[in-house]
Amino acid sequence: MSVPPAIAGAAPPCGEMDVLEKLTVLTDAAKYDAACTSSGGDRRSRAGYIGNTTTAAAGCCHSFSADGRCVTLLKVLLTNRCVYDCAYCVNRRSNETVRAMFTPEELADLTVQFYRRNYIEGLFLSSGVYRSPDYTTELMIRTLRLLRETYRFNGYIHAKAIPGTAPELVEQLGFLADRLSVNIELPSEAGLRALAPDKTKQAILAPMGQIRVRNQQSREELVKYRHAPKFAPAGQSTQLIVGATPDTDFHILRLTQALYDRYRLKRVFYSAYVPVVENPLLPSRDTKPPLLREHRLYQADWLLRFYGFRAEELLEPDRPDFDTRVDPKCSWALRHLDFFPVEVNRADYEALLRVPGVGVVSARRILVSRRVRRLRIEDLPKLGVVMKRAQYFLTASGRMAEGLRFTQDSLLRNLIAAERPALPQAVFEQLSLFAPA
Amino acid sequence: MTEIIYEYDGSFEGFLSCVFESYLCKELPTAFSSGEELPSSLFPVRTVLTDPERAARVYRKVAKLSPEAADLLRRGFLTCLPEKELCLYRLTAKLLEQGPRFLRDLSDETLLPVLRAVRHLNGEVHQYKGFTRFSDLGGVLGGEIQPKNRVLPLLRRHFCDRYRNERFFLYDRTHHEALFYQEGKSLICPLDHFRMAPTDETEARYRLLWKRFYDTIAIRERENPRCRMTQMPKRYWGTMTEFQGESYFRPTAAPAGVSGSAAPAGIPAPGTPPAPGPSAPGSAP
Ligand code: SF4
């Protein structure tokens, strides 16, 4: 392992850029990363330290940007200088763009001052590959160490582990951050080879494997020694770009499932590809980001994590993409009409969760309430069941909703109509492109 | 049972005293009033004095029957539910008469309005954990919110923990009360006249930095005003830094001598209380 460089000397001359300009450049360069949650931290407030991570259980949005995304962390790059040349990325070496670099002091000051004003929950630090993965990671470690030790910052930190970084450095990073993430970005090896020639599948999976193992060990040590240092206590996440490569939804969802199963990831984020360059290997610049697809993937991801679905139930090799017209759960229900109707007074939790319009919260409320008395159809909306969708799939005390008549065709039409108002505007517009004339 | 309107002091203890009174006098309150205007109606009005001991007896009784119900009462009393006292009275009466079993039926008609109001309150508390904004007023943090429900008592723990080494206040414009915190001690008290202290150059600078970050982090190709509005309704915007007009990003006072932008001098040394500044909310001139 090389000696951490002295940063003041190492920073390249950036002209006379002030912090406001740097912040602008390095935020702009970081904005395509979808991950912005502060969940899973467990730092309590300590005398002499600034902050805690106690809103972590539910995650805490401090604002929503004009694109409707949650803002919870100061999400910036340490630098957008990069020696790599990933075709899909604005920061790639060959792109003509303004470059900037924060000093550790500037970044620590911004984080702490934003945090004190309750603008943010903490810092999300990522970076272009400056000189080499190891060199960049050392700069990140210095920044985080300054923030934790000198500025005594006790809030949330999410740090990016750069593929190809030495394991010892990933190790150090993990003891400073609450969460680590390694972005896979391109969901297949072919995509990587074509579009990110400097990265390999192996280089990406190695730190992910290391993080999983160290996180597990650290948990076991904590059971034995209460004060054992915590390694990335909020686990790890990753991001997949959707729509830059020809990969199918089925492929992406299976990959997601494997990441949850094998690498114990806390979250997989999806990012609809926004064309930033003209490149024959990529969708043309006037292609709209595939927001509807991204939306369907998030819905399916939710079904994997909380509803007990498996990827293979939602999609198949000869039906590899999501139905654009209805959400994945409705789509599953329509293909399994023999499973329904579900009787709310008898069905177990797992079966209730399969009903479109019944969520984790309303399913639990049904379980609690039906112990007191038999539920009727009229009770269900009061428990939070969305009847517009659910009414076709359930009975209460053997009866369906009064006067409900439908055929297979009208059922599909009604379900499509029921989702419309809930869709984000841009997604809705993309959906209308698919609508029959 | 005679029907009657109770007038009381608007406090939680006062409300519990009313419950006690109604059982004592075998009366059924049809409305509650605290101060301002009395509902005009045919029923007689009586003023119920707050009696801490009676209040405690009612509360203990409720808590013994169901700790969840006691929590619902306390939280329900902070909500903006129309005629909240009446709803909470009915809930209490039903609990005292029938026992706690009906509380498990989450669609129960006496329980449901209170449950919904409390969910709304809890939601607003959660939102304000994120949407509250503070300014550094010469070393003291000060913020303002404009909630529908009385969220301060439920935000207290959160902000006192998070900013345990700071001094801060948070003013509720709707209910004219403020939370104060300093060195491990906090206080919520009514505050009729409130004016925010002036902004110095350092503060204006951080506001500008934040606004720039906020504007830059959005992806233009994905702009989605409707989604933003659903997630963060406009009523929150009034007290959020990123939605203020231009003048908010300019200093209104000479730079304070306490802190500069150079790190780490701008941060109060951990553990030591920050220097006093021109920040305590003053009364209007
Ligand atoms: S390594 Fe990261 S910053 Fe550099 S070009 Fe590739 S994706 Fe962009």
Image: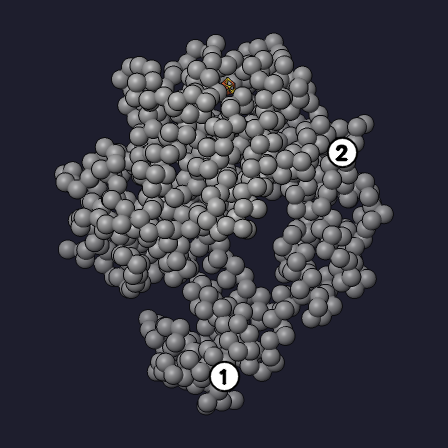
Q: Nearer the viewer, mark 1 or mark 2?
A: 2
User: Where's the N terminus of chain A, which quadrant?
Assistant: top left
Position of residue A367 relative to residue A65, above or below, is: below
As drawn, A93 above or below B75: above
Q: Amino acid at mark 2?
A: Leu
Q: Can you see residue A389?
A: no
> Residue drawn at (47%, 79%), measured in percent from left and top?
B60
Residue A422: give x, y in percent of width and height. Answer: 60, 42
- In the rendered image, the residue lying farthest to the right is A338
In the image, A265 versus B249, the foreground residue is: A265
Q: Nearer the viewer, residue A390 or B170?
A: B170
Q: Chain of mark 1?
A: B
- Is residue A183 toward the left or the right of residue B48 in the image? right
Tell me which corner region of the image, top left, top right, bottom left or bottom right, holds residue B17. Answer: bottom left
**What label does residue A9 carry, if any?**
none
Task: Identify the residue shown where x is 45% and y is 25%.
Answer: A137
The x, y position of residue A54, in whole percent, is: 45, 50
The residue indicated by pointer 1 is B28
Q: Chain of mark 2?
A: A
**Vertical order, B20 against A98 (above or below):** below
Tag 1: residue type?
Leu
- Secondary structure found at label 1: strand
Give left or right: position of A105 versus B233. Answer: left
Q: Is mark 1 within 8 Å of ligand 1?
A: no
Q: Secondary structure at mark 2?
A: loop
